[in-house]
Amino acid sequence: MPDDYLDQELPLEAKSSVILFSLLIALLFNLLPLQEIILLLRPDFVAITLLYWSIHHPQRIGMSLAFIAGLVMDVSNSSILGQHALAYCVITFFGMILHRRLRLFNVFKQAPQIFWVLLIAQFAVFLTGLLGGTYFPDWYYFFPSITGALLWPVISFLLSIPQKPKSDPNEL
Amino acid sequence: METVPQFFRAGPSPQVRLFFFALLSILLMVMDTRFGSFSGIRQTVGTIIYPLQRLAYIPATLFDQVEELINDFQLTKEIAYLRQQYFFNQQKLFRLQILEEENTQLRKLLGAAQQTEIKAIMAEILYVPRDPFNRKVTLNKGSSSEIAAGQVVVDDLGVIGQITQIHPFLSEVTLVTDKDHSVPVQAARNGLRSVISGTGKNNELELRYLSVNADIEKGDLLITSGIGGVYPPGLPVARVENIEHDRSRDFAIITCTPIAGVNRNRQVLILSLSSPIPEQPKEEPKNTAQQERKSRAR
């Protein structure tokens, strides 16, 4: 297990502009008008991006940013105001308390663990929606967590690009 | 006194932060569902993210254009067909004009109120919520194109829903399949009046509280009755799909399927009744009845 950690490069500190930009792009992906099946499978990109930043750069991202992102998502999703805000805060919470442990694994071993975090966040949206009396989803409502976990390696690779060290530290 | 160096300062612990933000969001949710006091915030945030929504819509328009290019090959056929249709429809239209004139005259004779004229605005579905179980869609026309909450949204087949929230350039439509949405309808066959409600499921509506012996059959077309003044009369809403008589219940379980492409179309029409809805008559008759009762008691 520690081998995974030794293989990893030491990333540079993330810039806040990069974080904000990535969140905007994730929001854009969430807003894409899609049809039935893809809509069912589409992961919550904002949630995954927030989770990535809170695992890899927990000092740079606060829960307030997650809260605001959640409010924006609630408005665009026309759900109850606060539903996604709560879910995203839960996500950053797990990122904050688990980041030391999760960083020991490589991305493929992280993915199944990411699945549970995403599922808990979705469950928060599901429960609040149920209590608010807005809707009763079917069981396949939880698909996006699975696809999100499957996409985790790709997304975390893309998000790690800006933090790559400019030159190889082992080079003479 | 011990001071923590800047480098190690971490602020409140994650648990405390989560507790604070969870409380805040629960407060927001309660305020939003119980008092609905945040339409201002919704409008501002909606306007801020409007450019993003437009940007996200670009791939769809590109796709449409490519599709149009491919369809160009079939255009000649379609033009011929449409021309034929046009002649047929023109004939019908003439008859309709005559009937309309006759109708207005007859109405004048009767001294009845003029039927309301309906204005229609074309709009496109811009955004379907990320969560497919949320029965709401966003349209690309808002209060800047004189759209108001409460207006009816239809497609070429029938009713889709009703506008429930407006932003300056966008508006939100609650679909008829939403659990909290009801439409006053009547059966086209015999004029039986009822109210049809969504179930929150895809492509399913239900007629609640119709007694077991109500004259309704499988395949009946349900159209808006115009009662309530929100929906113009005569728009198709649903077709009865299944009637179940459960002896343990007082009412029949009647499921219907919506006629309009509630989750198919991209182009829709927003209808607005140009004359305002007449105010509901005040409850004077009741008072007089009470007074009568009182006077009788004396």
Image (cartoon, coloured by chain):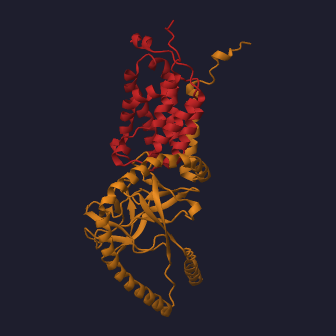
Residue B144 in the figure: left or right of residue A48 = right
Measured from the top left, where is residue B52 in percent x and y?
53, 45
Residue B270 in the figure: left or right of residue B292 = left
Query: As rendered, which of A75 and B251 lies closer to the eye?
Result: A75
Which residue is rendered at x = 56% and y = 49% of the image? Answer: B46
Q: Quadrant of the C terminus of chain B?
A: bottom right
- Palette colour of chain A: red
Q: Is residue A94 visible?
A: no
Residue farthest to the bottom, as pictured: B109
* Chain displayed in orange: B
Query: As rendered, which of B6 and A17 lies closer to the eye?
Result: A17
Measured from the top left, where is residue B184 in percent x and y?
42, 69
Q: Quadrant of the N terminus of chain B?
A: top right
Q: Is residue B197 visible?
A: yes
Measured from the top left, where is residue B290 in percent x and y?
56, 78
**What is the count of numbered marks?**
0
Which residue is rendered at x = 71% and y = 14% of the image? Answer: B3
Residue B81 in the figure: left or right of residue B137 = left
Query: As rendered, which of B275 and B68 lies closer to the eye?
Result: B68
Query: As rendered, which of A12 and B4 lies closer to the eye?
Result: A12
Residue farthest to the top, as pictured: A172
Q: Is residue B89 above or below residue A6?
A: below
Measured from the top left, where is residue A139 in percent x and y?
33, 42
